[in-house]
Image: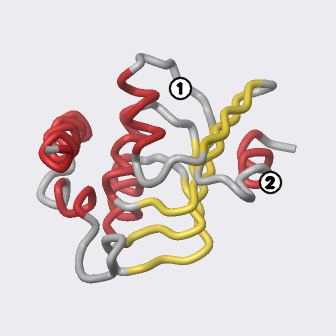
Amino acid sequence: MSDLDRAKANLAGHTLCLVKGEDMLVFDGRGIAPMMGLIEEGRDLSGYSAADKVVGKAAAMLFFKAHIKELYAETISKAAADFLKEKGLPFSYGRMTERIVNREGTGWCPMESAVLTTDDAEKGYLLLKQRLAAMKK
């Protein structure tokens, strides 16, 4: 079984599963929080395969920044798929949606909207940090 197949198989009941060989990381945090945390702590995720419940462009940028080898998304936004294609990061998905909506269902996800105008993962990461800091106030 491939790392990606193992990540997909262990996603049930969780929001994110990362697999590289015998190492498996499983998370239940919402949105981009698990990936932001891993990146901020300096965790080396190079070569991991990832399975995630919902991937918008913000999450796609974080997976790219973290050097994830391949990605499966149960739901992916068109902007995320376009970004991943452009960057050459292999991905598959269950369903594609035009956009990721906020938790209230009233508009764009604030993380997705924060990165819509850039295709630079480093700039996107900084924009996400700024948005998260502003939302905590």
Where does residue 42 sit, x and y in percent of width and height? 41, 17
Side of 89 relative to 11 (left or right): left
Screen quadrant of the N terminus: top right
Farthest residue in the right direction?
1
Q: Name the image quarter holding residue 23.
A: top right
Where does residue 102 sit, x and y in percent of width and height? 31, 71
Label number found at residue 9: 2
Q: Is residue 85 visible?
A: yes
**Mark 1 secondary-structure assignment:** loop
Q: Residue at x 22, y 61 (%)?
A: 110
Q: Earlier in the sequence, mark 1 or mark 2?
A: 2
Where does residue 58 sit, x and y in percent of width and height? 31, 52
Side of 112 relative to 41 (left or right): left
Screen quadrant of the C terminus: top left
| Type of amino acid at the residue the image marks with label 1 | Leu
Q: Is residue 120 visible?
A: no
Residue placed under numbered mark 1 in the picture: 45
| Type of amino acid at the residue the image marks with label 2 | Ala
Q: Residue at x 48, y 39 (%)?
A: 34
Q: Examine the rendered structure and indicate whether residue 3 appears above or below residue 59.
A: above
Query: What is the crowding at mark 1: few (fewer than 14 residues within 10 Å), some, or many (at least 20)?
Result: many
